Image (spheres, grey):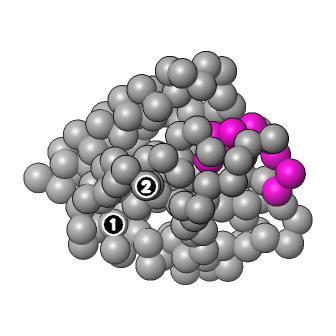
């Protein structure tokens, strides 16, 4: 379908540690909620996420990664508890993949999540806007 790009999307597993790192470095967490065998997830990764990583867009201000909510997938939440990844995502009102979450170091959702994908041509613009808004809110929390 889409050519595989050699740029890997980091896989998030321990949000307790990620939150600590985000707090230390003043970064926003951008989380792609994904599933295996999800063509729209692959589309977002191929057209938006991997190019962002490769170009180092926002490299100094965000931690960008992916969680899979398929059965058996687990993550460590912000409180240090191992939970099913789908349960973790549902805490944010998640209901469909792909979804992008914009979280502060404490796990608080700072910007409205982006659900699904409509217009690929405009998606990067909307992601950038959400990141900029999240960073402003994050700076307000830190100041």
Q: Residues within 10 Å of mark 1 (few under 14, many from 20)?
A: many
Q: State yes or no: residue 40 in magenta.
A: yes
Q: Residues within 10 Å of mark 2 (few under 14, many from 20)?
A: some
Q: Is residue 32 left or right of residue 142?
A: right
Q: Which residues are magenta?
A: 36-45
Q: Is residue 89 left or right of residue 139?
A: right
| Residue, disc 2 | 54
Q: How many marks?
A: 2
Which residue is drawn at the image coordinates 67% and 79% (left, top)? 82
Q: Which quarter of the image is occupied by the N terminus?
A: top right
Q: State yes or no: residue 12 in magenta.
A: no
Which residue is drawn at the image coordinates 68% and 31% (left, top)? 116
Q: Looking at the picture, how far across and down is residue 138, in whole percent?
A: 26, 48
| Residue, disc 1 | 22
How far separated are the C-alphas under marks 2 and 1? 20 Å
Q: Main secondary structure of the magenta part?
A: helix
């Amino acid at each position: 379908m889409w050519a595989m790009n050699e740029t890997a999307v980091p896989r998030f597993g321990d949000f307790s540690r990620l939150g600590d790192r985000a707090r230390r470095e003043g970064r926003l967490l951008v989380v792609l909620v994904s599933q295996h065998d999800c063509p729209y997830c692959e589309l977002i990764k191929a057209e938006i996420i991997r190019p962002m990583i490769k170009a180092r867009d926002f490299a100094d201000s965000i931690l960008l990664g992916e969680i899979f909510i398929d059965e058996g997938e687990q993550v460590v939440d912000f409180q240090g508890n191992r939970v099913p990844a789908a349960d973790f995502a549902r805490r944010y009102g998640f209901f469909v993949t792909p979804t992008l979450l914009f979280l502060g170091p404490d796990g608080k959702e700072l910007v409205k999540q982006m659900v699904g994908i409509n217009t690929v041509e405009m998606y990067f613009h909307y992601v950038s806007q959400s990141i900029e808004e999240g960073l402003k809110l994050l700076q307000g929390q830190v100041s």
